[in-house]
Image (cartoon, rainbow, N blue to C red):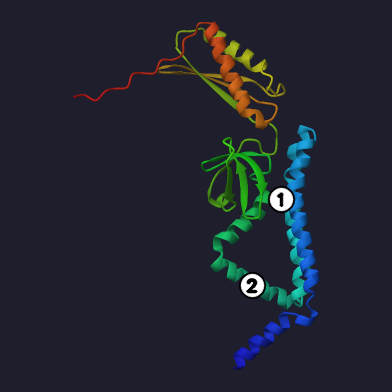
Amino acid sequence: MPDTQDAEKQISQILRDWSDIQLVEAAIVLAVGIVLAVAIKWLVPRLAERVPDRFRLWILPWEPIFRVVVVVFLFAYIIPLFINPTPENLIAISGTLAVALGFAFKDYASSLIAGVVALYERPYRNGDWVRIEDAYGEVQSHDLRTVQVLTPDDTLVAIPHSKIWMTAVYNDTCGKRDLMCVADFYLHPDHDGVLVRQKLHDVAITSPYLNSDRPVVVVAAEQPWGTHYRLKAYPLDGRDQFSFTTDLTLRGKAMLRRLEIKPAVAAPVAQPSV
């Protein structure tokens, strides 16, 4: 019984008396915090869409930071309403929570910690175009446990932040509007390479999606089946990448057809001998 009495005494020292706990105040603060977090998640992306494009990718990353500040404030305000906030009590509660999370919610806690690390290291930010394992798309939201990525097929993928511990994150934009696009052309080897290179360059610089402040590069590589051209250029906005690549491909094909340049012919597939 002494152990039970000691435990009850320790709990009574940590928790406030029920008559001293302001439940109404805690409920109001919690409700206001939730409404504020939801409002931030709704307002910041819409504000970013209404400002000039050069400010959009600067505003979007602030959304998860503001929401984390709200959550930290909620914990800092509400916890002292229920416990006596002495250093000893805070250390005891922190240790208990750490042990409980470590055993019962290991993966969840790992994702939460990784989410905080991601806010500092910024492997991805709202508005970035990233590839994480098989998912590629634009980062829509940086939540506490997951990052929400919208794919080109309009599918929203929730990826745990814990992926950054062991998985490579490919970021095409890194907080900028620049995103290189590549249009591929496969041609028969019998053609004037210098002419094709110049014409493909002209196709890129006449595109309405082109960011003229970035270079246009044409790379050619000879293959056993023909010549592989890669037309590399940057659109004005990363969200235009698919329209830009389509524009380069279709107008490039039309140009090659006018020049009567034949496409590459695939090598015949070897048939098994009977």
Which quadrant: the C terminus?
Answer: top left
What residue sits right under mark 1 in the picture? 64
**In the rendered structure, which disc, 2 or 1, sits on the residue that comes first in sequence?**
1
Residue positioned 57% across, 49% down in the render: 159
Amino acid carrying label 1: it is Pro
Residue at disc 2, secondary structure: helix
Q: Percent position (x, y) of residue 262?
A: 46, 10
Identify the mark at residue 95; answer none if there is no mark: 2
Query: Residue drawn at (56%, 11%), measured in percent from left and top?
Result: 254
Residue at left offset 74%, top offset 61%: 72
Question: Considering the numbered disc 1 on the image, is that residue within a helix, a strand or a loop?
Answer: helix
Residue 6 appears in view: yes
Q: Is residue 108 above or below residue 215?
A: below
- Report the front residue among 27 and 186: 27
Residue 205 spot, x, y in % from top left: 67, 16
Tell me the quarter of the picture where residue 97 sits.
bottom right
Q: Amino acid at mark 2?
A: Gly
Q: Is residue 220 above or below residue 134?
A: above
